[in-house]
Each structure stands twice: as structure tokens, then as C-alpha cells.
């Protein structure tokens, strides 16, 4: 299981902070950098800038809400960023949540499964040059598409249409009971990526770490799709699901994801203090180096 970083700096930080994090990912020998797109920076533009400064790091969106970009516009942006970063971009997509689409984006909400199927089909055809509307730049650079999926119907759609899934607020039970059954033979053959993003903190004070995680991320626990997955995992909120504690406990948490079938763990480092934050980075670097 590869180790990457998931960061919300695209929401709350500066472009230079994003670039600095990507440089740190490379310095620490981690495999990739995943970032959401919500109410902050345009994530694809920020990844293009960061990727131009740093080589060897996979750059992923987790995720681009599909209501924000018509398929042709997103295909143009993907082709441009992919050329800038030399083929290292992976694009995670998702329908987002009704509350965000209506309240934050100011757009109409449509049934997510049908809308995602139509959107991914159009986007893939435009990117492949098989649609009447084609992007003519960036020849030869293929882009993997992933879907944000934590529930059975979307996981099945991902297995049918794209290269894998990226999860948030999901634990090993979701991978074992939902994602792998949907992927079937593709998961068994290693041709289906399962990237799981979750808060993590190496600390001697797990309670303080979980309190920090709840303060920063707890509001998302109320979103219906997350409530379903949290209930499946048997916890009340993402702070309970997070991996936090001394090194042995964190290692055990990562081992559980690897055993469940996750191909990559995208660590969202949230710590109550700078010391815990840095020792979490160092722990992840050592884990990645040991895995080769």
C-alpha cells in the first residue's frame, strides 16, 4: 500500500503553501498529493503550479465536483495541466453533496448516479478524441479518472467506468464490504485503484488529536452520504474513524487498510501541535521507505 498526502490547503491555504507541501511530499519520499476542490483555490490550477516546481510526485484531485465544470471545460483544463506536469495528474470526480451544490455552488441538484454516468461518459469521450467535440492539445498523455465513492451504487459505477475510487471518511469495512465487491475481478487483479483519504496523527495524546479533527472536520459528519458510511463503520464521526495514537497504534491502523485492499492511503495530517504534525510526517516517510 503506497502512502500519499491528502491536504485541504487548496481550501484554506495559499498557492505557495500548496507548492511547499508538494515539495515536502517529494522530499519525504511519499507517492502523491491529493487535494479537494471546494470554496478555495482552483485545485487543478494550483496543482499545475506546484507540479511545475516539483517532479516525481503524482498529483490528484479528491475530488472535482462535477457540477462546477462542463465536460468540455474540464477536458480542456485536464489536457493543459497534464502537459504542464508531464502526465502526473490523476483526476478524481464526484457529484458532491446536495447541500454544497445548492448552498455553496448555487446550482440545481440532479440525481447523482445518472448525472455522474452521463458526465463521465462525455468527459472520457472528449479526452479520448472519440467525441465530435475534441481537445486537440496534449497528445499522448493519458489521464486516469477516479470516482469519489463510499456507497454501493457509486462504487459499482466506478468499477464499470473508471480506473478506481477515492474515499473520504470511510474505513476498512467500507473497502471490504462495498468497494472490493463492486470492483470484483479488477480488484483481485490489481487493476482497480482504491485510494482512501482519512485524518491521521502520530501522538501521545490521541484524545487531543481527535478533538482537533472533530473541530476542523466534524461539520461534514452531518452530510447524508457520510452519515451512511460512518454508520456502516460503527462510529459517530470522522474523528472516531481517524487513525490517531502512538506509532504502534497508527501502524496497526494502516495495516488494517492494507489488509482490506486499499492500494494507497492518502494521509490527511491533522495534529494539535507542530511536534505531532512533524512526527506524523516522519512516521509516514519511514513507512513509505519500508514498503519500498
Image (tube, rainbow, N blue to C red):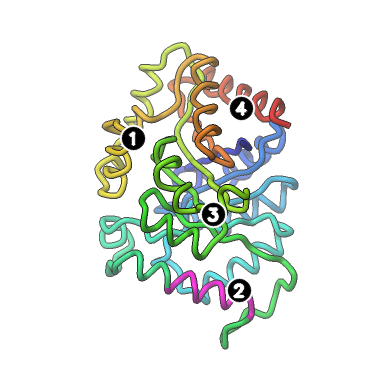
Cβ atoms under marks 4 and 1 closer than 8 Å: no
User: In the drawing, what numbered circle is on residue 127?
Assistant: 2
Mark sitting earlier along the chain (4/2): 2
User: In the drawing, what numbered circle is on residue 233?
Assistant: 1
In the rendered image, residue 276 lying in the magenta stretch gets the answer no
Q: Which residue is drawn at 55% across and 37% down?
A: 265
Cβ atoms under marks 2 and 1 closer than 8 Å: no
Mark sitting earlier along the chain (4/3): 3
Q: In this view, does 62 lie to the left or right of 173?
A: right
Question: Which residues, given as a range, are shown in magenta?
Answer: 118-129
* SS at badge 1: helix
User: In the drawing, what numbered circle is on residue 164?
Assistant: 3
When asked about the image quadrant of residue 29, the answer is top right
Which quadrant: the C terminus? top right
Residue toward you, 128 or 156: 156
Location of residue 35 in the rendering, given as x and y in whole percent from the top left corner: 52, 47
* SS at badge 4: helix
When asked about the image quadrant of residue 21, the answer is top right
* SS at badge 2: helix
User: In the drawing, what numbered circle is on residue 284?
Assistant: 4
Amino acid at each position: 500500500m503506497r502512502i500519499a498526502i491528502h491536504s485541504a490547503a487548496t481550501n484554506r491555504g495559499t498557492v505557495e503553501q500548496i507548492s511547499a507541501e508538494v515539495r515536502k511530499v517529494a522530499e519525504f519520499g511519499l507517492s502523491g498529493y491529493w487535494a479537494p476542490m471546494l470554496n478555495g483555490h482552483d485545485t487543478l490550477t494550483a496543482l499545475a503550479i506546484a507540479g511545475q516546481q516539483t517532479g516525481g510526485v503524482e498529483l490528484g484531485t479528491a475530488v472535482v465536483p462535477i457540477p462546477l465544470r462542463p465536460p468540455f471545460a474540464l477536458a480542456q483544463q485536464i489536457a493543459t495541466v497534464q502537459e504542464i506536469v508531464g502526465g502526473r495528474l490523476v483526476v478524481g470526480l464526484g457529484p458532491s453533496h446536495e447541500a454544497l451544490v445548492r448552498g455553496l455552488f448555487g446550482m440545481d441538484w440532479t440525481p447523482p448516479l445518472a448525472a455522474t454516468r452521463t458526465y463521465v461518459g462525455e468527459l472520457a469521450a472528449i479526452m479520448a478524441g472519440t467525441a465530435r467535440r475534441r481537445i486537440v492539445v496534449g497528445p499522448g498523455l493519458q489521464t486516469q479518472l477516479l470516482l469519489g465513492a463510499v456507497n454501493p451504487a457509486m462504487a459499482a459505477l466506478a468499477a464499470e467506468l473508471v480506473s478506481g475510487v477515492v474515499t473520504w471518511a470511510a474505513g476498512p469495512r467500507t473497502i471490504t464490504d462495498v468497494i472490493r465487491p463492486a470492483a470484483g475481478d479488477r480488484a483481485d487483479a490489481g487493476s482497480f485503484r482504491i485510494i482512501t483519504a482519512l485524518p491521521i496523527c502520530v501522538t501521545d495524546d490521541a484524545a487531543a488529536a481527535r478533538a482537533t479533527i472533530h473541530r476542523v472536520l466534524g461539520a461534514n459528519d452531518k452530510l447524508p452520504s457520510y452519515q451512511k458510511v460512518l454508520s456502516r463503520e460503527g462510529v459517530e464521526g470522522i474523528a472516531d474513524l481517524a487513525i490517531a495514537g502512538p506509532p504502534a497504534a497508527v501502524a496497526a491502523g494502516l495495516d488494517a487498510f492494507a489488509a482490506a485492499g486499499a492500494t494507497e492511503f492518502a494521509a490527511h495530517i491533522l495534529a494539535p501541535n507542530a511536534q505531532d504534525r512533524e512526527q506524523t510526517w516522519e512516521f509516514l516517510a519511514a513507512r513509505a521507505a519500508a514498503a519500498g
